[in-house]
Amino acid sequence: MIKGLQKTTLIDYPGKIACTIFIGGCNFRCGYCYNSDLVFKLNEIPSITEEQIFNFLETRKKFLEGVCITGGEPTLYPGLEIFIKKIKDLGFSVKLDTNGSNSEVLERLLKGHLLDYVAMDVKASLENYEWVIGTKVSREKLKGSIELIKKSGVDYEFRTTIIPDVIDSEQITAICQEIKGAKRYFLQQFRPDKKAIGEKYRKMKPLPISRLREFQDIARQAIPEVAIRNC
Ligand code: SF4
């Protein structure tokens, strides 16, 4: 299920020079998803073995500080816990990107002190979630993941991609209520992509940055640190 390795990134792990490992497969079908190959074409993407990853990491101990594990949805990877433990044993910090649907796995990873940073996508208000992700999801598990992350004691962020036809001021207000008590929230600019799962998202124009600033002002009423990610 390991389908990609970006050998160096300065932006994926806040404050750290890192590499990023891509785990294939996802239980969501977000229309705007530009990683659709990782969601639908797993068999067409060559796999990378864990051995290859560890051989690479051994050679990068002096240069990299962290490892980002992203997807797809990494918590679907059956060997994730042991995989992360081995990465940490090599001395790297680990950041996990997750859609928050798998709160049991997240809880085990956090309880095992296997994560140093968690980034959870909050796609929309809970009411609109299934419309955005194109499938069913347990609201209880999403809420459970939010609470686990807030109480975890590890560094974290919640983040929302500003999908033009979904996210508006009301959505931002509702999301901020649902993540209330969080310390950091990112508003991520939407980018149309020719590989997006939903055809309409392949050419859709992003909202102007001024609109994101309005959302930022709204979110700041509830969350201390709110930033716009425009890259
Ligand atoms: S954007 Fe949605 S469908 Fe794509 S990888 Fe993330 S959670 Fe899965």
Image: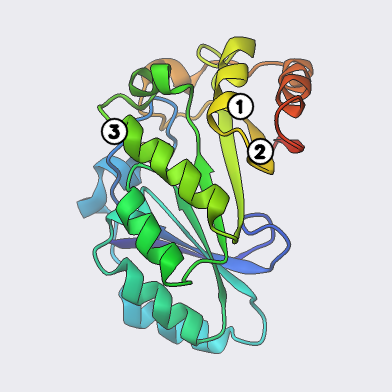
Q: Are marks 1 and 3 in contact (CB under 8 Å)?
A: no
* Callout 1 secondary element: helix
Q: Are marks 1 and 2 in contact (CB under 8 Å)?
A: yes
Task: Quote the CA–CA distance across marks 1 and 3.
Answer: 19 Å
Residue under numbered circle 2? 185
Residue type indicated by callout 2? Tyr
Q: Are marks 2 and 3 in contact (CB under 8 Å)?
A: no
Task: Quote the CA–CA distance across marks 1 and 2.
Answer: 9 Å
Q: How far across and how far down the image is residue 158, in percent?
A: 58, 41
Q: Residues within 10 Å of mark 2 (few under 14, many from 20)?
A: many
Task: Quote the CA–CA distance across marks 2 and 3.
Answer: 22 Å
* Residue at x 28% of width, y 31% of height: 137
From the viewer's perspective, is residue 21 above or below residue 162? below
Q: Which mark is residue 138?
A: 3
Q: Nearer the viewer, mark 1 or mark 2?
A: 1
Residue type indicated by callout 3? Ser
Residue 79 seen: yes
Judged left or right of residue 94, residue 102 is left
Q: How far across and how far down the image is residue 115, in percent?
A: 50, 66
Residue 191 seen: no
